[in-house]
Image (spheres, rainbow, N blue to C red):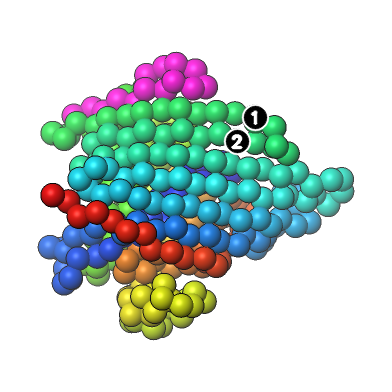
Amino acid sequence: MKHGLRVVVLALGALQAASGSGLAADVVLAPHRAVYDVTLKRTSERADLSGADGRLAMELGGSDCEGWTTSFRMANEFRPREGNGRVIDTQSAGWESGDGLSMRYNQREFLDGSQQAERKVSARRDAAGGIGQAEFEKPEQRTLELSPDTVFSIEHQKRLLRAAMAGSSHDSTLVFDGSDDSAGYRAIAFIGARKAPGQARSAIAGAAGEVLSKLSAWPMTISFYSTKPGEDGGEATPAYQIGLTMYENGVADNLVLDYGDFALGGNLKVLEFLKQEPCE
C-alpha cells in the first residue's frame, strides 16, 4: 500500500489555476495544510480486514522561486477478522524545484510504533529531454536511469490541472516519485466533467469553505501501472488507483485509495490556506 502514499501527498497539492482557460492557462501552487479522516471503504476476502480507520495529514509550502516542500503523515489501524489490529504509520518529507527538474524525498514507515523501513532518494531530469538520474541513499546506495519523458510529482499535478482547464478528459504521464525501487509509474488519468462553483459541495466550513464554494472542480481517477521489467506488459489491472474531486485551486476531497483487495476513503475535515511569499 505504500506506493500510493507519496502520490496522494501531491495529488492533494493545492494548485491554483491562473485566470482564463484553454491550453494557454497555467497553474501555480497555493500552500495549504489539510487533514482527512480515513475509513475502510471496501474490502475482499483476500484482504482479511474487518475494519480500518485513521487520519491523513499533509502540508504543502514554498513557491516556484524557492521550490516546493511537502510533509505527509498517514496513520491507520488495520483490524483483521481475527486477532489484534496493527497501526501502520507512514511519514514523508519532500522537495521539488519550481522548474520540475530536481527532487528529494525521505520516507519512514512504522508498525505499531517501531520503525520498519526508511527511504532516501534524490533525482534530476534533463531540461532538454535527456535521460534523468535517481540517486538512492537508503535503503541501499544505487543509481537508476530515468526515461527522458519522466516527470516528478508536482509537475505531474500541474499537467493534470492544465488538462482539466483545457477541457481534456485524459492524460498519460510517466511519473517518478521515489516511493519505491522502480523508475516510476505510468499514470493514466481520466478527468470528469467540470463542476461549476458550488456544485462540489465540500463539507469544509468557515473561510476555507467560502473559498471552495467559489471554485470549479473536476472528478479524477488516476491509475498507476508498474514499469518494472516483467510487470510492464500492458496488464489490465493497475498497481493502485486514486480517485478524488480536485478543486480549481487543487484542494482535493472525496478520496478513494484503491489497492485492489481493499480501498480506503478519505474525507476532508480540516483545511487551512498558508501564506505564500511572492516571487521576486
Q: Residue furthest top?
A: 141
**Looking at the image, can residue 110 be seen?**
yes
Which residue lies at the image location 44% right of the left edge and 30% below the top edge? 182
Can you give x and y, in whole percent of width and height, for residue 251 in the image? 40, 64
Examine the image and state in which quarter residue 209 appears: bottom left
Q: Position of residue 240 (x, y in %)?
A: 52, 49
Residue that appears at 40% across and 39% down: 94
The vertical placement of 6 against 183, above or below, is: below
Pointer 1 and pointer 2: residues touching (CB < 8 Å)? yes
Disc 1: which residue: 116
Q: Of callouts 1 and 2, which one flags the residue occurring earlier in the amino acid sequence? A: 2
Question: Is residue 263 inside the magenta stretch?
Answer: no
Q: Which residues are magenta?
A: 130-143
Q: Is 147 rendered above or below residue 72?
A: above
Q: Main secondary structure of the magenta part?
A: strand
Q: Can you tell which mark lies on residue 109?
A: 2
Amino acid found under the numbered disc labelled 1: Gln
